[in-house]
Amino acid sequence: MTLPRRFLPTTQTLQAFDAVLRLGSFTAAAAELSLTQSAVSRQVAALERQLGRALLQRSARGVQPTPEGRIYARAARSALEELQRAALALQGAGRRGQLTLAILPTFGTRWLIPRIPRFLRAHPEITLHFTTRIGQFDLLAAQVDAAIHAGRADWPEISATLLFEDRVQPFAAPALQASTADEIARLPQLGIASRPDEWRGWAEAHGLPAPPPAQMVFEHLAALAQACAAGLGVALLPPFLFRTEIARGELVALGPGWANGAGYWLITPDQARPRPEVAAFRDWLLTEITREEGVYA
């Protein structure tokens, strides 16, 4: 049976309606969809006119669905997810044998890339494509099959496999001396942009007052470590990525390791069955990490 077109909204309209409900405001929905607030409002109003029902109502708690809107929201979400699954299936069929990975700059160059020859020997049928990303992003929009992420696995609509717990230590150049947490806290602190509260968490874990903002903040761990080795201050670094500098005495540990509550994760789109290439890479990655158990402590 062919439905009258007046019952079939556009996917843009469904996306606007779904985003407003998920995020609780037209402003947040507009930011997610890269539209203006008025454009999102027009999309939702057009949907309400098309259906002849009010779907949303504003309240002190933000935007809430009407009873009719709650029913329609479930159908809209289901339709969007079905379209997403179909797109994933088509993309997977067209990219068989290819795997696109988003990697962290320092983790990628210092840990992952040196081990990739072992993966290629085990899976010569897979062609790898690498891109560099920091922080959350839309894997589907970026056409990325999997991402290595350091932090918390709090992305929307993803599956996350924990690789290992993230542990950092305070390091400094040999010229900077400190033997207690209080002495470390008095040194110039260097920070990483993706973890603005890390020094605050370290101070709380050691019973110290919240520190002032870091005097210098870097985007990449490698640059942070270089500044630390140059004597510019103390930095919280994961030792497993800087074993060469530690062995050469360029970086000196000033205190014990500290679990910052984060981890290293393999992030993939949320789907019931990952592509064979993704599953193969995930299994290989976990095997590599198991081989080196204890290295990340």
Image (cartoon, helix red, strand yellow):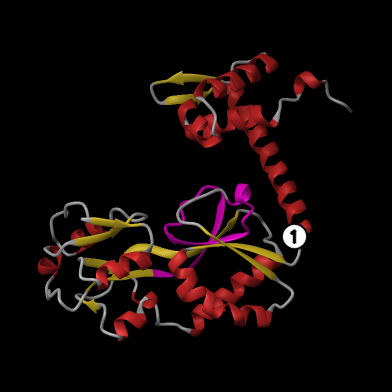
Residue closest to the far right: 1
Q: Nearer the viewer, residue 271 or 28?
A: 28
| Residue at x-position 31% and y-position 86% | 247
Q: Position of residue 18 (x, y in %)?
A: 58, 32
User: Within the magenta stretch, is there residue 21?
Assistant: no
| Residue at x-position 52% and y-position 47% | 156
When the figure is inspected, residue 41 is found, relative to residue 273, above or below; the finding is above
Q: Position of residue 64 (x, y in %)?
A: 49, 25
| Residue at x-position 66% and y-position 78% | 120
Determine the secondary structure under disc 1.
Answer: loop
Give the quadrant of the C terminus: bottom left
Give the quadrant of the N terminus: top right
| Residue at x-position 67% and y-position 56% | 272
Residue where numbered disc 1 is placed: 95
Q: Position of residue 32 (x, y in %)?
A: 52, 36
Q: What is the magenta range?
A: 139-165
Quadrant of res 224: bottom left
Q: Nearer the viewer, residue 242 or 28?
A: 242
Whether residue 183 is visible, yes or no, is yes
Whether residue 297 is visible, yes or no, is no
When the figure is inspected, residue 32 is found, relative to residue 279, above or below; the finding is above
Q: Position of residue 189 (x, y in %)?
A: 20, 61
When the figure is inspected, residue 251 is found, relative to residue 65, above or below; the finding is below
User: Within the magenta stretch, is there residue 144?
Assistant: yes
Crowding near pointer 1: few (<14 within 10 Å), some, many (20+)? some
Quadrant of res 70: top right
